[in-house]
């Protein structure tokens, strides 16, 4: 977690967002929407403040939110979750992930993730003192490599961390891929920690399947999600984790000493939001169109894109541009993009282990977000076209 000189390393999102602010470039780096979530949810939070819900809420989360999370899992996926013993509300998915890893893994334990991986998964493993074992997605289309996953799992494997829909690649793991992961987890007696924050943001035929719904998996899976992406309220930081009572108890024990409880007035508001399936459905539809706009623009600018099936993000390969632009790799390209094209992206190497073969293989890739208004994306696409000539 420390930089080369011992200083606290800044996350790539903070670095690139600061770069955008400094240069006035369009920030397609950090993934957050530029249109806030629905008024009825925002009003519900204001009402909760006015109703005096301003002191420490229960450490588990307010009862109506735990109930709404359980209802949501039953309605969408047929998962039967006990809101009293099997759900924990957290300060965003980030806390749910960190507390789960800290609760279940320590020195001598191995934690497997896919690679590329979301940065906080790796940081959580480092904070726990466990050993991180990344398993590359396939070079072609960023799919699960089940043989590589099987080879990576050892008797020391405590946790397999999944993320679907996947940040940064936009891969949505299929039921068949998840069945392969489930078989490996059952055989090795590993717990699966699954990050499903983009569960509602899938496009076209892609269907989100929670691994907890597969046979024999509910008893060994911690499922993490968050209201940030689903309701375009990323700054509220209301997340959750659910799973078997025994595992959730372990996570709750850690959470007590990380944050104790999470923001009181936002919780009843998100409880109301979770009854609304139309908002995320409309967001997914409009995001699919914005994905197409950005993918076409990136292709016209000279990037090769793998069209994402979900999330906020597309990974674009700048390999054909680097030589002509005189930049070394994707990270260098991201540092220069504000001046070259007035746009900011995030290098995919930031989602890889430094120096890993995957990091080298993906060195020329850049992640861009399309969760911006259409006019902003059109502006960005116009600017990116400067790279084409
Ligand atoms: N997991 C993934 C894959 C993400 O992209 C993000 C970023 N939003 C998070 C977790 C963190 O979610 P939250 O803001 O709810 O902590
Ligand atoms: N999840 C968002 C992203 O991947 C925001 C990350 C962050 O700011 N830590 O861009």
Image (tube, rainbow, N blue to C red):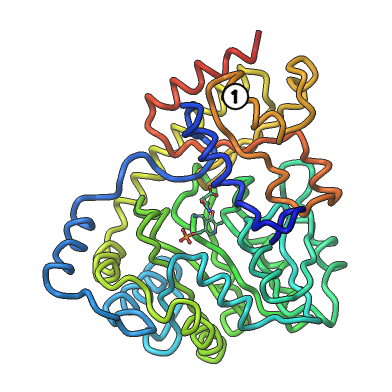
Examine the rendered structure and indicate whether residue 73 appears above or below residue 288.
below
x 81%, y 48%: residue: 358
Disc tally is: 1
Residue toward you, 14 or 301: 14
Q: Specify the quadrant of the image occupied by residue 177.
A: bottom right
Examine the rendered structure and indicate whether residue 218 appears above or below residue 196.
below
x 31%, y 75%: residue: 65
Residue labelled 1 has its Cβ within 8 Å of some atom of ligand 2: no
Q: Left or right: 222 with respect to 334? A: left
x 59%, y 12%: residue: 386
Examine the rendered structure and indicate whether residue 320 appears above or below residue 359.
above
Q: Which residue is mark 1?
A: 298
Q: Left or right: 331 with respect to 152? A: left
Q: Position of residue 99 (x, y in %)?
A: 56, 76
Q: Position of residue 188 (x, y in %)?
A: 78, 81
Q: Left or right: 40 with respect to 105? A: left
| On-image quarter of the C terminus | top right
x 52%, y 17%: residue: 383
Q: Residues within 10 Å of mark 1 (few under 14, many from 20)?
A: many
Residue toward you, 325 or 22: 22
Asked which secondary structure carries label 1, the reply is helix
Q: Specify the quadrant of the image occupied by residue 83.
A: bottom left
Residue toward you, 152 or 387: 387
Examine the rendered structure and indicate whether residue 309 appears above or below residue 368.
below
Q: Position of residue 219 (x, y in %)?
A: 59, 85
Residue toward you, 299 or 32: 32
| On-image quarter of the N terminus | bottom right
Q: Position of residue 309 (x, y in %)?
A: 56, 44
| Residue lying at the far top of the rendered structure | 389
């Amino acid at each position: 977690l420390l930089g080369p000189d011992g200083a606290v390393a800044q996350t790539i999102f903070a670095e690139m967002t600061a770069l955008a602010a400094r240069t006035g470039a369009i920030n397609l780096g950090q993934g957050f929407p530029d249109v806030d979530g629905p008024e009825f949810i925002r009003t519900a939070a204001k009402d909760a403040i006015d109703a005096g819900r301003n002191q420490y809420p229960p450490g588990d989360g307010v009862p109506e939110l735990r109930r709404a999370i359980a209802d949501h899992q039953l309605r969408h996926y047929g998962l039967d979750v006990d809101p009293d013993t099997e759900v924990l509300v957290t300060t965003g998915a980030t806390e749910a992930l960190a507390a789960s890893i800290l609760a279940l893994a320590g020195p001598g334990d191995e934690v497997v993730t896919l690679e590329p991986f979301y940065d906080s998964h790796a940081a959580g493993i480092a904070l726990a003192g466990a050993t991180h074992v990344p398993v590359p997605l396939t070079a072609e289309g960023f799919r699960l490599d089940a043989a590589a996953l099987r080879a990576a799992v050892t008797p020391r494997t405590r946790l397999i961390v999944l993320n679907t829909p996947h940040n940064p690649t936009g891969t949505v793991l299929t039921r068949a891929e998840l069945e392969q992961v489930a078989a490996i987890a059952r055989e090795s007696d590993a717990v699966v920690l699954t990050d499903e924050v983009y569960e509602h943001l899938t496009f076209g035929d892609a269907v989100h399947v929670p691994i907890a719904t597969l046979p024999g998996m509910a008893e060994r899976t911690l499922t993490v999600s968050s209201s940030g992406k689903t309701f375009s309220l990323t700054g509220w930081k209301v997340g959750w984790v659910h799973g078997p009572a025994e595992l959730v108890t372990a996570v709750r024990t850690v959470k007590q000493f990380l944050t104790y409880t999470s923001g009181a007035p936002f919780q009843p508001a998100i409880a109301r939001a979770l009854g609304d399936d139309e908002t995320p459905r409309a967001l997914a539809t409009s995001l699919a169109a914005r994905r197409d706009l950005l993918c076409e623009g990136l292709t016209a600018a000279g990037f090769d894109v793998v069209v994402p099936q979900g999330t906020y993000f597309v990974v674009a390969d700048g390999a054909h541009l680097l030589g002509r632009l005189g930049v070394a790799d994707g990270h260098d390209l991201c540092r220069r993009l504000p001046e070259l094209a007035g746009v900011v992206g995030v290098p995919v190497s930031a989602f890889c282990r430094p120096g890993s073969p995957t990091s080298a293989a993906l060195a020329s890739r850049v992640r861009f977000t399309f969760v911006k208004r259409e006019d902003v994306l059109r502006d960005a696409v116009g600017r990116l076209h400067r790279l084409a000539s």
